[in-house]
Amino acid sequence: MFVDLRDRTGIVQLTLDPAKFPDRGDIRSECCLAVTGLVHERAEGTKNFRIPTGETEILVESFEVLGSSKPLPFPVSDEEQMATVNEELRVRHRYLDLRRPVMYQRLAIRAAVIRRMRAYLDASKFLEIETPIITKSTPEGARDYLVAYRLEPGLWYALPQSPQQYKQLLMVAGVERYYQVAKCFRDESMRADRQPEFTQLDIEMSFVESEEVLQLAEALAVSVINGTIEEFGVDKEAVGPFERITYQEAMDLYGSDKPDLRFGLKLFNCGPILASTTFGVFRDALETGNVVRGVRYPAGGSLTRRELGTLEELCKEFGAKGMATLVLGPTHEENRGSIARFLSPEEVAGIKAAAEAEEGDLLCFIASDYATSCDVLYRLRLEIGDRLKLRDPRILKFIWVVDFPLVEWTTDGARWSAVHHPFTSPKDEDVHLLDSAPGKARANAYDMVCNGYECAGGSIRIHRPEVQQRMFSLLGIDDATQQAQFGHLLEAFSFGAPPHGGIAFGLDRAIMLLTDTENIREVIPFPKMGNGIDPLMDAPSPIDPQQWAELGLRLS
Ligand code: ASP
């Protein structure tokens, strides 16, 4: 009788001689088994060269079932079948799901990434410091998780959305170089790449400007990622050095502040080319302050009407009124597409040059306000990249996006809000804009982006109390609220605070990139489902009447 025995390193075949063991006793699938036996080479003809341990087996002398097993809710040894298993069922029995080698590998890669981060930062003289989980509300833009204070009903702690204020206070304390593998809590609407609690590698440094933070963070990322790729034989090319582009360039060329630069297909702007066009639709758009921008679909001239239709549907879904097309032919007369006959040869030549297009390419145009055109063309470009298989999974294309705006006008149109967070400093040369044109002021803020995802973000902070107060006022926080919410920080800054700045990496995101997973739950040992529920522990759950009473709470 043959049995596959699995431990965390893999499987090995056991052979039980029927003469010695007339029945297999309690050995059942997924039981916990101890065996004593002789490891030996399998006989010729019985070797299995497709599995790593296929040339050996263990001839069992004795065995003991340490823990029996009921039939499993899903077959953990069959990856093909596992792909069809309901995810909530897997999470409910996560301790079984984690028996699968792929899941173990993700845990191992996660551990290796954290180990390498710690090693790098320890060697660079950073101090790992824990900051409180039960604390005061920290404004990072999301809703807080609240914890009732038993001793004085009506008062609440909040779980930190990040250790932002504590790490700044550590700089005032003279720590100079801090890091933490920190849990952050944000009560946001859930998405495939979000969890109510997630892990950041959080870093802060004193006496630095953006350049030093960028260099440290890039060297750290290169060391950790390349080291992990090598350690696990991950099928990816080594990363670095990282290109840098400004926020404005990112929006102009890719329509997004987190562009996927594994491929080109830069967006092009037709404004200057069409300045005196006779084509009414584009002329009207440009005259009313809108833009006409486009993206190239290489060899897209061969798309069927139907394929074109789905592209146009996509644009509408993302907010465009429509999509105009131009297919470049060998001569002007042979150009095709919805707007071919409205454009002059000179206009087409200008557009062709701006798009870096060739004969046979399809050019897709959007006429709309700048923001909508960014949104639509960003997604259209990714769609074209997907269709043409330009988003190579073997490449992790890291870039820096720098010079973010300091504030933006909120969508409800009522006030300015911080693009990064309220502690981010404006660029020195833009401070004068704070009163006259805050929306034009740039921040000392940067994001590390990979393959279209934000991996890390940070900034140089404000460290002077009067500048911080001015920033709070700009954000519409009145003096009394400033004192109530941030009095501690303003006071700390009045005791000789050093200039400082930092960054935080999303750890879960990094593991997703290294393991080619698109669902954040796959890289988290015990995740919450999309509705925030933990089906394993059955949390959240009701509490005892006595706990309600202790906290002085009643449902209204
Ligand atoms: N606390 C920031 C965040 O969570 C990161 C930083 O500015 O260092 O996004």
Image: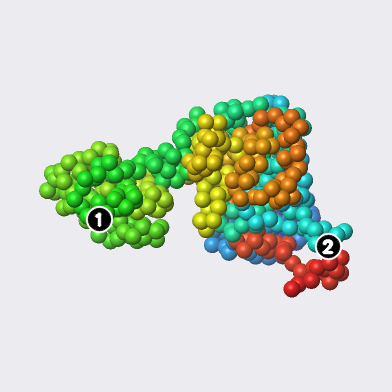
Determine the residue positioned at 32% across, 52% down.
288
Nearer-the-camera pick, 95 or 248: 248
Label drawn at residue 235: none
Compared to 474, does 66 lie above or below? below
Label drawn at residue 153: 2
Note whether residue 506 is visible: no
Determine the residue positioned at 23% across, 40% down.
350
Count all numbered tags in the image, as a single digit: 2
- Label 2 sits on a secondary structure element that is loop
The amino acid pointed to by label 2 is Pro
Note whether residue 221 is visible: yes
User: In the figure, is residue 244 to the left or right of 71?
Assistant: left
User: In the figure, is residue 342 to the left or right of 474?
Assistant: left
Determine the residue positioned at 52% across, 31% down.
429
N-terminal of the two: label 2 or label 1?
2
Q: Which residue is mark 1?
A: 281
| Mark 2 crowdedness (10 Å alpha carbons): few <14, some 14-19, many ≥20 | few
- Label 1 sits on a secondary structure element that is helix
Q: How is the image coloured?
A: rainbow
The amino acid pointed to by label 1 is Val
Determine the residue positioned at 41% across, 58% down.
318
Q: Position of residue 479 (x, y in %)?
A: 69, 48
Q: Image quadrant of residue 538?
A: bottom right
Q: Position of residue 224 (x, y in %)?
A: 60, 33
Q: Position of residue 245 (x, y in %)?
A: 45, 35
For the residues marked 2 and 1, what is the alpha-carbon distance in whole angstroms? 62 Å
Nearer-the-camera pick, 498 or 507: 498
